[in-house]
Image (spheres, coloured by chain):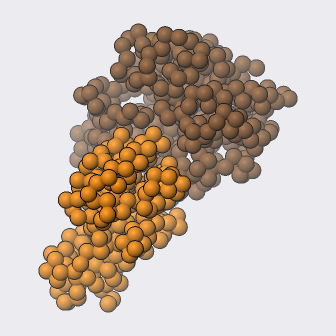
Chain colours: A orange, B brown
Amino acid sequence: MELLQEIAVKVEEGKHLDVVSLVEKCIEAGIGAGDILNKGLVEGMNSIGIKFRNNEVFVPEVLVAARAMKAGLEVVKPVLLKEKVQSKGTIVIGTVMGDLHDIGKNIVCYMLQGAGYDVVDIGIDVSKEKFIEEARSRGAQIIGLSSLLTTTMTYMKDVMDAVRNSDIAENVRVIVGGAPVTREFADQIGAHGYAADAASAVDVVKVLLQA
Amino acid sequence: MNGKERIMNALNIREPDRVPLYIHGINEAPIIGIGREITDGLPEPKEFHEMNDQEKVKLLDTLFLLHEHFDVDGFTSFEIGHEVEVDAGHVADDWGVVYTRSHHGLPVATGHPIGGPGDLAGFTPPRPNRGHLILLDLGRDRFKGEKALFWLMRGTFVRSWRLMGMENLMVQMFDNPEFVHRVARMVTDYNLEQLDMLVDAGLDVLVVEDDIADKFSPLISPKQYSEFINPYNKELVDKAHRMGLKAVAHSDGNLWPLLDIMLETGYDGLNPLEPQAGMELKKLKAHCGDRLCLLGNIDCVDLLPHGTVGEVDNAVRQAIGDAADGGGYILCDSNSLHPGVDPLNCIAMFEAVKKYGARNA
């Protein structure tokens, strides 16, 4: 148990090399891959997420924590597959067409990965067709739409309408976020979820997947 | 008072004869949209690089004309001619940063030439080019001292992340702080050299344009800001002051956690004061209105694109009521007049300043 707590602390501190060796130690000690993921890596990201939400840490601290988490995840991933640990869910996420900004979307990706979800980042300037195609082929339960500009966030409605009229409509929920996006706008376009910030995106996804 | 006197009074926290009006940034579409109310012969809205020479000249003339027609008190200029086209969708600047063109505003930096110390070792930075100051020259010659001349100089954070990539810059703050300092030194040396040229060209106000916050908080911590960014930007502010200029800080987002550091740095003004990011005029005025001129706050996210003329009029009246007493307020929008703003709302903003901005000075 101490090793798992240590992983969480090192993830939070952004010490990726320490995380890798601790995860290796855990595997050697026979600790289950699900525990390494949830009580170690996810716990560390959860802690940094809370501090980020409270403005106690900033983007650079999140980035190095995410790097540490991902380094640990790479080591534990083969064991997760071997032990058939079930994914919590798959999220396809991208910045909508016309918009080339990515840092906000990237932070949401790190937070979701850090919470144990499978995240497929399909980049920037993404068309409605690509959102649907990727969600379909990955079997995603959630599509995440990001936008930094008032002029590009209107494309979120196009994506929503396209999803609603597609064959994946019944299986997928859409969440929206980004600097100019508001709850009112999200409701207006019929999005299933609205995330005001990166940390709350995790809460929104959790609720949608439980519904 | 003329426009320049109004702006300088406000930056000195003295009350001008009316609240000054300023446009920090404006895209082609609003220049054309607003311009159609005062001139004819303008092309359909399109980007500058898509225009022929005749259309470019007309656009530039309309930019000047709208400053004159609506009594905008300051004129903003910035580098022109430092970029070359890579292909139809991309341009590269003289540092080797590649930008992807966007129909929704300025091109976005997507190609970064300096990934790590190895790249920096073989990197030769450009030298400032006097020819790139042509917009400042044109503005100076057109307005002949009637309007304050502003220059948008990219600050240390923006120049550094464009060279290195933003996430890389942030991670390098932990992995290799000395490398981050070396890049900051390089871009500051460029900026300091360019400042000499700007002073010779007749500049009045240096805007250190260094977006470093989102609507919730700064992107980096106050400690990181104090270590990696602010000392270099302070060199620009100090030199500007030594050379008789005013210095304004520009950053989007919630700057409250950095505000006291910025005050100590000696900026004369702060722009653009996004209402959605908690940069409330009344609160700012109470906190530092006696030391820092406030520029901005008229909402360009919701109000100018989607509001009514009446709502814009009210917002201007409210802003002037909140921040103009005793001087130290320059009215402008909360970031830029981007392609999404309604030209009639922009005109309503310009006109409301005259309606509510008269002072007793």
Pick the quarter of the image with the N terminus of chain A: bottom left
**Residue B293 visible to an observer of this rendering:** no
Tag count in the figure?
Answer: 0
Pick the quarter of the image with the C terminus of chain A: bottom left
Q: Nearer the viewer, residue A155 or A34?
A: A155
Q: Is residue A181 above or below residue B188?
A: below
What residue appears at the point 32 percent right and 35 percent down from the top-left corner? B99
Q: Nearer the viewer, residue B288 or B199?
A: B288
Q: Judge from the rendering whether residue A78 lies leftward or rightward of residue B299; answer left or right.
A: left
What is the x, y in percent for residue B212?
A: 48, 48
What is the x, y in percent for residue A119?
A: 28, 63
What is the x, y in percent for residue A150?
A: 48, 43
What is the x, y in percent for residue A99?
A: 37, 43
The quadrant in which residue B246 appears is: top right
Of all residues shown, which one is farthest toward the right?
Answer: B360
**Residue A205 visible to an observer of this rendering:** yes
Q: Nearer the viewer, residue B121 or B162?
A: B162
